[in-house]
Amino acid sequence: MSDVVRLSPLVRRITASNSGPMTGAGTNSYLIGDAEVAVIDPGPAEDRHIENILQAAAGRIKWIFVTHTHADHSPAASMLAKASGGELRGCVLEPDDGHQDTSFKVDHNLTDGELLDTSEFSLQAVHTPGHVGNHVCYRLKNEGMLFAGDHIMNGSTVVIIPPSGDMRAYLESLRKLKQLPLNTIAPGHGEPIQDAIAEIDGIVSHRLMREEKVVEALGKAGESSLEQLVPLVYDDVDKSLHRVASYSLWAHLLKLEKDGVAEKTIEKHWAFGEEHWRLH
């Protein structure tokens, strides 16, 4: 069995073997509690990873939570539920946008702020749209630990994928998290982050810096396509990642349009400083 890492008195972590450029060392699956176990993000549909979770939980899985329905976080959920009898919980708010794991079906559709109280722990759902519209973080109230899925990752920035992904919503969700008593962030990928509030502040600052570069690039280049803007805005990022970065660039432009700073003039093109929006 892969290593089970004890992060705290209530939390254990098992990492799936799906390492890669977008997943780091792999997807982190978290087990909360001992007498009755809640699993957060069972991960990809890998038989070995599912068996590792089942062995670590020792027949005590009662709830299976997902932060969002992407292929590296939720496909194992239905398989784990079938094997364990655990109740599937998540947030289904949107139709498939072409990036969703459509195999995930909830037994219980969560609402923002909803609590699961057990004899061992209290887990709160926090709706955090941004990366995608149905993203949920989970706050372990006993320890001030936030299970952040892909809202916050250790070692890399989160890709925002429109139309479900929304940069304005992402920043608002980060500011929302700052209002909660948090100590540690347990990300969907990477190691725990100890100073939660400082990390959130750093992410907001980074995104606003990137937004300033978008505005600067539009001001210098004039009307430009995404393809033309990516190397200007992401000149500090390896070119092999520019295609992925174009999604977040698109999300920045959509936010700037809502803010009245940029407008879409023809399909896939933008102009700086205009006051109206026109579809091709």
Image (cartoon, helix red, strand yellow):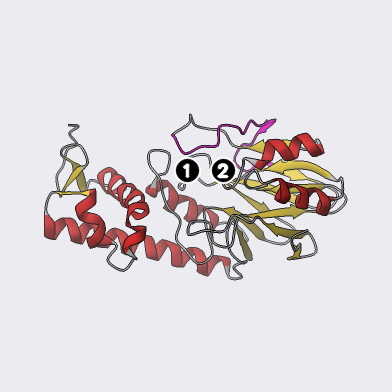
Marks 2 and 1 sit apart, C-alpha to C-alpha, by 8 Å
Q: Residues within 10 Å of mark 2 (few under 14, many from 20)?
A: many
**For this rendering, which residue is in front, 182 or 219?**
219
Query: Compared with residue 232, is residue 65 higher up or lower down, i.e. above or below?
Result: above
| Residues marked 2 and 1 touching at CB (< 8 Å) | yes
**For this rendering, which residue is in front, 52 or 217?**
52
Q: Which residue is mark 1?
A: 132
- Is residue 70 a member of the stretch shown in magenta? no
* Location of the N terminus (image quadrant): bottom right
> In which quarter of the view is residue 86 placed?
top right
Residue displayed at 76% across by 62% down: 4
Residue 165 pos. (x, y %):
42, 43
Q: Residues within 10 Å of mark 1 (few under 14, many from 20)?
A: many
**For this rendering, which residue is in front, 221 or 202?**
221
- Main SS of residues in magenta: loop
Residue 54 pos. (x, y %):
80, 48
In the shown orientation, is residue 271 left or right of residue 244? left
In the shown orientation, is residue 262 left or right of residue 140? left
Residue displayed at 54% across by 66% down: 197
Residue 132 pos. (x, y %):
47, 43
Query: Compared with residue 230, is residue 106 higher up or lower down, i.e. above or below?
Result: above
Query: Compared with residue 133, is residue 217 higher up or lower down, i.e. above or below?
Result: below
Residue displayed at 70% across by 54% down: 30
Q: Which residue is mark 2?
A: 68
* Location of the C terminus (image quadrant): top left
- Is residue 99 a member of the stretch shown in magenta? yes
Residue displayed at 54% across by 65% down: 154
Query: Which portion, as a residue range, is magenta?
Result: 98-114
